[in-house]
Amino acid sequence: MDRIKGLICRECSREYPAEDLHVCEFCFGPLEVNYNYDAIKQSISHQSLRDGPPSMWRYKDLLPVTDKQIVGENSGFTPLIKAENLGRELGLNNLYLKNDSVNHPTLSFKDRVVSVALTRAKEMGFDTVACASTGNLGNAVAALAAEAGFRCFIFIPGDLEVGKVVGSQIYEPTLVSVDGSYDDVNRLCSEIANEVPWAFVNINIRPYYSEGSKTLAYETAEQMGWTAPDQVVVPIGSGSLLTKIYKGFQELQMLGLIPEAKVKTNGAQAEGCSPVATAFREGRDFIKPVRPETIAKSIAIGNPADGYYAIRVATETGGVIESVTDDELVEGMLTLGRTEGIFTETAGGVTVAVLKKLVEQGKIAPDDRTVAYITGNGLKTQEAIMGAVKSPIKIKPQFSDFKDQVKI
């Protein structure tokens, strides 16, 4: 594993072997993968990437795995769409949508992170995988565990959307519904992880799992002709996605694959669970946990593990972190569907609504090359827009009734 030195603490820089660890034993800071970029630079080029598979795994040299038996080998490389209609409505001339609502196999960006996590878990000899999930992660873990032959346990909050519950059940994991919020579920899973030899993808395997999010930046840059955008808008749950997209652009610059990347990195939250946006607005670098009260359940994390780091990235890049109401996020979902024909889940509605707010505030200029990350599919959260869409026109099977009731 000459590309991988091991793990390193994000706070005190102490180094650890590349094992199932996620917290520094000295300062309790989070661990992340420590790469040998000099070695990577010798093996990676635009041509080598073009010659790779048509999936996120063309970037394998920048991911913390060695096994040739990839789990989820078809995940990633989703479309980057020039959003002409939405851009025109918002007054943006260079708006793009990175559309992970069509990702494989479960229609969200979580397919990326889980593909990396389960490939690494397989390399490390685990036979059982598990996670705490607000829905999308559980779907991805259950699906890819079925593909790879793992035993699988999924822990979810009791009020999860039906589409996401069924989206895990179809793969026949052991599905455990917990009477509480995601933060309650995550605390329980942390206790279980200390007692059983399982690969919890967002606990003891988290340093590897989170690296999968970088592929969104890699793909964006490649699809934009090996350049970075001026601005990105990213939904925030734990905060990890935003920080890893930023890391991905920085790595490409470091390796000479793109010119200097000055990407203003903006975050989006729902007001009913916006501890990161609130801290950013108040000028704090620490997070005050909250109890989630929003329909955007996929990003309803009241005590986000990477919230501090998301604030730091936004601040250092000149970005901002904003929040929108549930009504605004529903309008964001409807707007995206009406203008671009994309049915996104609630997190995507948050992203579009915050994008609109940042344009109105003058934070995003008309000619900025801007990428909004659409991270999940609306078929999973249909409840959110049931009261906001128009009812069908009911007619009898006669042309005369059609002519009377339908304006043509």
Image (spheres, grey):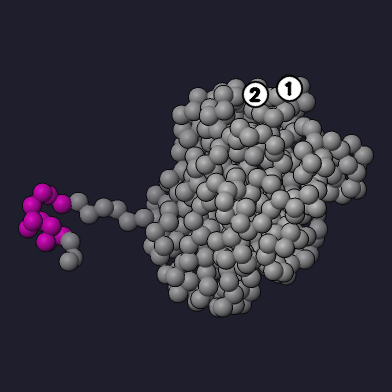
Residue 385 location (% of width, % of height): 42, 52
User: Looking at the image, which is closer to me, 92 or 353?
Assistant: 92
Task: Residue 197: give its label.
Answer: 1
Q: Is disc 2 placed on a helix, strand or loop?
A: strand
Kind of residue at badge 1: Pro
User: Residue at image x 12%, y 61%?
Assistant: 404
Q: Is residue 2 magenta?
A: no
> In which quadrant is the C terminus drawn?
bottom left
Residue 326 location (% of width, % of height): 53, 56
User: Residue at image x 52%, y 69%?
Assistant: 95
Q: Is disc 1 placed on a helix, strand or loop?
A: loop
User: Residue at image x 70%, y 24%?
Assistant: 125
Cα distance, mark 1 to mark 2? 8 Å
Residue 88 falls left or right of residue 55: left
User: Looking at the image, which is closer to me, 268 or 274?
Assistant: 268
- The answer to whether marks 1 and 2 mark residues whose Cβ atoms lie closer than 8 Å is yes
| Displayed quadrant of residue 207 | top right
User: Residue at image x 63%, y 67%?
Assistant: 227
Q: Is residue 401 magenta?
A: yes
Residue holding disc 2: 128
The boundaries of the magenta stretch are 395-405
Which class describes the residues within 10 Å of circle 1: few (<14), some (14-19), or many (20+)?
few
User: Looking at the image, which is closer to me, 306 or 62?
Assistant: 62
Which class describes the residues within 10 Å of circle 2: few (<14), some (14-19), or many (20+)?
some
